[in-house]
């Protein structure tokens, strides 16, 4: 109820406006292009054959749009109501996944830690506005829950395939990392009792969503590749922010090592914004679950270090790493319990780190896209958290 009531009436950034445009076009016109929506000229768009499209992978907009279109048949007037479309879209992609994260984490953690995961991390920061990050976090956690089952059977194999394909369709970057890591980990862990039938079931169950994802991409752009990989074809339209009007974050081009530091401990560092997750790095013994989580985390960080120079645009903190938070928090709790068993004095330090994590997440909740002021002034290159605090608590 809390998260549902907090959904705003309209988008506040190019990011969520682009997602809304893609969904609105499906709801109102059953079209993939966004030319008939108020967001035709949004910054986060792709243009091909004279038509504008959301820059986001089409699968989520397509499925969400047709679901909303079906539900709104009960009251057709809502089909033209942008506020209703935005609110239901955010409910489906934020609130329902938050509930899933709570239920799934409750199977592994106790109640207070499950509540902290929801209200004390960047999941809380991004809980209001339309994104794919919380949904992806829920899928990551469900995938983890199925993979760590002692006995892999038909059900776990089918679920694994569906979840892997969902990650690919919702965030192709995430899919490019999670799918190979998961399959390699699965084969390594089960090398002594590997069941080819289970691998085949994973492959077969992944096909429907994967095929639909690539089909939608091809229908839009006549290519199976993400259009961002072919900027001269799809991003070279007049006034394109991608190529011709670069400002602020789009101008950033730090050296690789600096970017790696900024993504981990620096300006947009996962462990700067979520310091409680530092405890996930302290592993006393080899563990197959630790191997899976750390491999995916390292993959995310290295991919973004190499491919993403702008640290996530005007967003608050390392938004692209939000899907990793539930998994890393599970590891952190295990290590915190070990440390507390050895020395109760550490509870003061751990409590302080918890407090910092919660405070930063609350700051982000004020407006997770409010670094635009920092972008204009260039402060974000150095320490955007300071600018965000100023914008959230003093300028508002």
Image (spheres, rainbow, N blue to C red):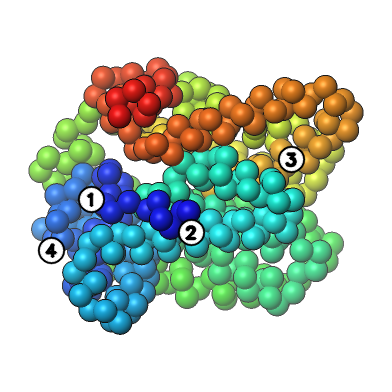
**Residue 191 % position (x, y):** 79, 60
Name of the residue lying farthest toward the bottom: 74
Give whichever of 364, 300 is nearer the camera: 364
Helix, strand or loop status at disc 3: helix
Quarter containing the C terminus: top left
**Horizontally, is 60 left or right of 293 in the view?**
left
- First-in-chain label (1 vs 3): 1
The residue carrying mark 4 is 36
Helix, strand or loop status at disc 4: loop
- First-in-chain label (3 vs 2): 2
- First-in-chain label (4 vs 2): 2
What's the distance in space between the residues labelled 3 and 2, CA to CA?
27 Å
**Residue 228 % position (x, y):** 30, 48
Q: At 36% across and 68% down in the image, what residue appears?
A: 64
Checking the image for residue 45, the label placed there is: 1
The residue carrying mark 3 is 333
What's the distance in space between the residues labelled 1 and 4, CA to CA?
14 Å
- First-in-chain label (2 vs 1): 2
Q: How many marks?
A: 4
**Mark 2 burial class by Cα count in 10 Å: few <14, some 14-19, many 20+:** few
The residue carrying mark 2 is 1
């Amino acid at each position: 109820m809390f998260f549902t009531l907090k959904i705003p009436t309209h988008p506040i950034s190019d990011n969520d406006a682009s997602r809304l445009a893609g969904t609105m076009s499906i709801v109102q016109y059953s079209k993939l292009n966004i030319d008939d929506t108020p967001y035709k000229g949004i910054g986060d768009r792709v243009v091909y054959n004279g038509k504008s499209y959301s820059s986001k992978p089409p699968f989520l907009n397509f499925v969400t749009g047709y679901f909303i279109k079906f539900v709104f048949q009960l009251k057709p007037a809502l089909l033209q109501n942008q506020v209703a479309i935005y609110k239901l879209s955010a409910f489906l992609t934020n609130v329902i996944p938050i509930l899933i994260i709570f239920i799934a984490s409750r199977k592994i953690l106790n109640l207070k830690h499950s509540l902290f995961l929801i209200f004390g991390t960047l999941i809380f920061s991004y809980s209001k506005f339309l994104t794919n990050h919380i949904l992806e976090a829920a899928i990551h956690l469900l995938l983890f829950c199925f993979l760590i089952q002692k006995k892999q059977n038909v059900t776990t194999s089918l679920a694994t395939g569906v979840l892997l394909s969902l990650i690919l369709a919702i965030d192709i970057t995430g899919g490019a990392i999670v799918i190979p890591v998961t399959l390699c980990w699965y084969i390594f862990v089960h090398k002594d009792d590997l069941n080819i039938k289970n691998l085949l079931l994973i492959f077969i169950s992944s096909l429907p969503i994967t095929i639909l994802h690539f089909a939608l991409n091809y229908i839009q752009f006549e290519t199976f590749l993400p259009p961002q990989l072919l900027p001269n074809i799809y991003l070279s339209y007049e006034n394109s922010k991608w190529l011709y009007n670069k400002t602020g974050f789009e101008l950033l081009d730090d050296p690789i090592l600096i970017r790696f530091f900024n993504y981990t401990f620096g300006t947009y560092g996962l462990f700067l914004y979520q310091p409680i997750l530092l405890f996930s790095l302290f592993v006393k013994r080899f563990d197959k679950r630790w191997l899976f989580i750390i491999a995916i985390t390292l993959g995310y960080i290295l991919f973004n270090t190499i491919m993403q120079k702008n640290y996530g645009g005007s967003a608050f903190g390392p938004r692209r790493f939000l899907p990793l938070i539930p998994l890393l928090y599970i590891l952190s709790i295990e290590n915190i319990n070990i440390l507390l068993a050895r020395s109760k004095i550490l509870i003061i330090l751990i409590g302080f780190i918890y407090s910092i994590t919660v405070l930063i997440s609350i700051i982000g909740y004020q407006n997770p896209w409010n670094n635009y002021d920092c972008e204009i002034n260039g402060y974000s290159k150095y320490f955007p958290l300071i600018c965000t605090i100023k914008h959230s608590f003093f300028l508002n």
